Amino acid sequence: MDTPVTPRVVACIDHSHLAPAVAATALAIARLIGSEVDAVHVGAPDATVAPNDSVAGIAIRTVIGTPETVLVDELRFDGVEFAVIGSRNLLAADQLLGHVSEALVTTADIPIAIVPPNGRALPDGRLRVLLPLDGDPATSHAVVAPIVSTLASVGDVVPLHVFGGSSAPMFITSDEDRSVLAEEFAARHAPGVHAPVELRIGHAADEILDAAAAQDVDAIVVGWHRHIEPDRARVVRRLLEDGRFPLILHPVRSGNDTDES
């Protein structure tokens, strides 16, 4: 008889100042989805981390090896449902993240929460998240249902759609027509989300950040196709560069790779 696999949230722990926030965020997510936290630190062959070392009250499991290889493998194990990493903001060097974090976000088939450089962790309890939707059915299908099911009774989802200047309907300035358009968009792309879809016109990343601040959200959830190239990750790059909000990257498995987030 097979042994049941315990659902886990993997907290990727390093020696940076973000380790406590990464652990706290993992704990908050684990409580939301009913899983355990597995805090993993990758040590060199001469590592001296003791088995009972801990962060934010969570015991650290040390694995000897190369961080990129070990952590990519860790996120592929059965039962791993979520991962949490920290961002030390390396965009000045034209990097989206460090090379280990980049390997994780481009290969993992699970959502990954990124703690920003300011160390802002997800709160333990009810969450309020901003959910930008690009109007791509694949993104909506991949992201909306899991987020709604996770936060249905313990959080709030604030949906947002940003029209580029050339894609905005001419009648969007009318309050009545804006309301109709928002309802139509919600029916197609945000089923199960009870909050009305906020419609904006402008640059996607700027409007997302402005809405996140105005709505006082705890995190921003973004569906993306796991492309790290600068011309394919402009929105994610800008959100990371801003560094104010935890970011949850939700992988979108689709043959449509035209999205730029």
Image (cartoon, helix red, strand yellow):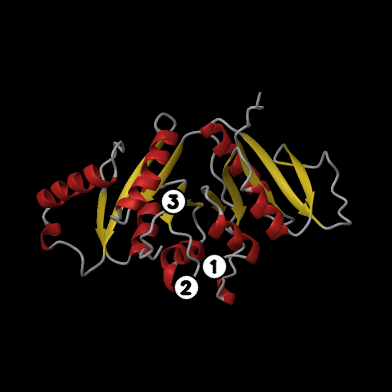
Q: Earlier in the sequence, mark 2 or mark 1?
A: 1
**Extreme-top residue of the structure:** 1
- Whether residue 87 can be seen here: no
Is the residue 174 above or below the residue 23 in the image? below
How far is the residue under mark 2 from the one under mark 3? 20 Å
- The residue type indicated by label 3 comes to Ile
- Looking at the image, which residue is at 60% across and 34% down? 7
Q: Which residue is mark 2?
A: 230
Q: Earlier in the sequence, mark 2 or mark 3?
A: 3
The answer to whether residue 187 is left or right of residue 236 is: left
- Determine whether label 2 and label 1 are within 8 Å by CB: yes
Is 95 on the left or on the right of 147, as rendered? right
Q: Position of residue 124 (x, y in %)?
A: 55, 36
Is residue 100 in sight in this rendering? Answer: yes
What percent of the width, then of the height, locates residue 215?
36, 48
Q: Residues within 10 Å of mark 1 (few under 14, many from 20)?
A: many
Nearer to the camera, 155 or 225: 225
Image side of residue 251 versus residue 174, left or right:
right
Give the mark count. 3
Percent of width and height locating residue 225: 44, 59
Q: Which mark is residue 220?
A: 3
Q: Who's the residue at 65% across and 62% down the image?
A: 100
Helix, strand, or loop for circle 3? strand
Instruction: For marks 2 and 3, give the one nearer the viewer.
Output: 2
Q: Identify the mark nearer the N-term, 1 or 3.
A: 1
Give whichever of 172, 60 is nearer the camera: 60
Q: Position of residue 86 (x, y in %)?
A: 61, 55
